[in-house]
Image (tube, rainbow, N blue to C red):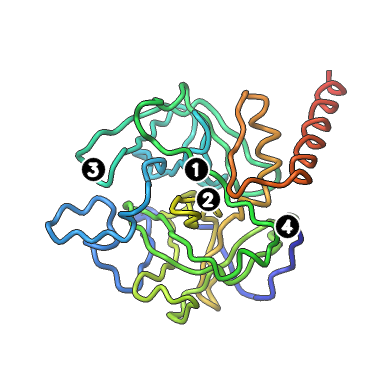
Amino acid sequence: MKFLLLSIVIVSMFLFPPDGRGTMIVRDYTPSEHYRFYTGSDKNFIGTPYDFSGVGSSNGGHWATLVTDNCFFSATHFHPGPGEKVTFWDSNQSAGSSYTYTVTGGTSVGSSDLWLGWFDTAVTVNSSIARYPVLMLPLVDDYFALELYNYGANHLVGRNVIDEVGLYTYGVSSLAVAWYDYDNNDSPSVGGDETYLQGGDSGAPSFTVFVDRLALTGVHWGISIDTPGSFDTFIPAYYVATNVLLVTRGQILSSVPEPGSFFYMLVILCLLWFRQRRCTLR
């Protein structure tokens, strides 16, 4: 997978939430359309066809997106810590069935802002809580102009379109990111659903629909100011590195579409390297 340096030269910042915890801006926000747990009779939630049950939140305002039986993605700079409790809802009704789990640990994936955390126990198999696959397309160019469903603070859901995918340098690190602007001029158009991330959205996910199912593409990381837009940590770039961590816990990420044999060879090489490194450290 080849990455280009982002061509946009703009001021960016982590989405450190202030005390008021800003909520994702949705251009023509309407509670009946963009609030997952809206209860009015005129509810017309844009996410109704899809399963958001694997997106959980804590009382501390942190986000966790379930990817295996008890492991989740969040943001390194703003994630639920050990002892924090995260709740998942199995429907788009806050009064419906919910399940709460305690975080016991986690780690950054490489030098990225992607956080892999885990709970004290597996999320109940019979609870219908989704585990999300990662969207693994053959080429970076294949991600351009993909429509996103962005999940944000207060359980808002909006849409946007990927404009750039590449490496973004922050300090001494180069991070793989996806960027989507806020200009009311998307192609394909998302109209009044267009999103612009804010402080309380850090660590929440972005999805793409693949064969009628939500697949992960990003975790919210930062914003651009000079050219208004939002950054996600680009999860496909960290698929192998995440599996290197997960294999020690007896788990593995799933993906759509199914990767080819060359990709599996890369995974095996990474796992062999990890095993050799562990043996050396002993």
Three-letter code for the amino acid on which mark 3 is drawn: Ser
Label 1 or label 4, whichever lies nearer to me, is 1
Residue marked by disc 3: 94
Check the picture and name the quadrant holding the C terminus: top right
Three-letter code for the amino acid on which mark 1 is drawn: Tyr
Q: Earlier in the sequence, mark 1 or mark 3?
A: 3
Three-letter code for the amino acid on which mark 4 is drawn: Ser
User: Does dot 2 land on a helix, a strand or a loop?
Assistant: strand
Q: Earlier in the sequence, mark 1 or mark 2?
A: 1
Marks 1 and 2 close (CB-CB < 8 Å) = yes
Which disc is residue 132 wearing? 1
Viewer-nearest residue: 276 or 13: 276
CA distance for labels 1 and 2: 6 Å
Drawn side of residue 37 relative to residue 152, left or right: left
Q: Earlier in the sequence, mark 3 or mark 2?
A: 3
Marks 4 and 3 close (CB-CB < 8 Å) = no
Check the picture and name the quadrant holding the N terminus: bottom right
Residue marked by disc 4: 174
Residue marked by disc 2: 216
CA distance for labels 1 and 3: 21 Å
Three-letter code for the amino acid on which mark 2 is drawn: Leu
The percent coordinates of residue 35 (x first, y second) are 27, 57
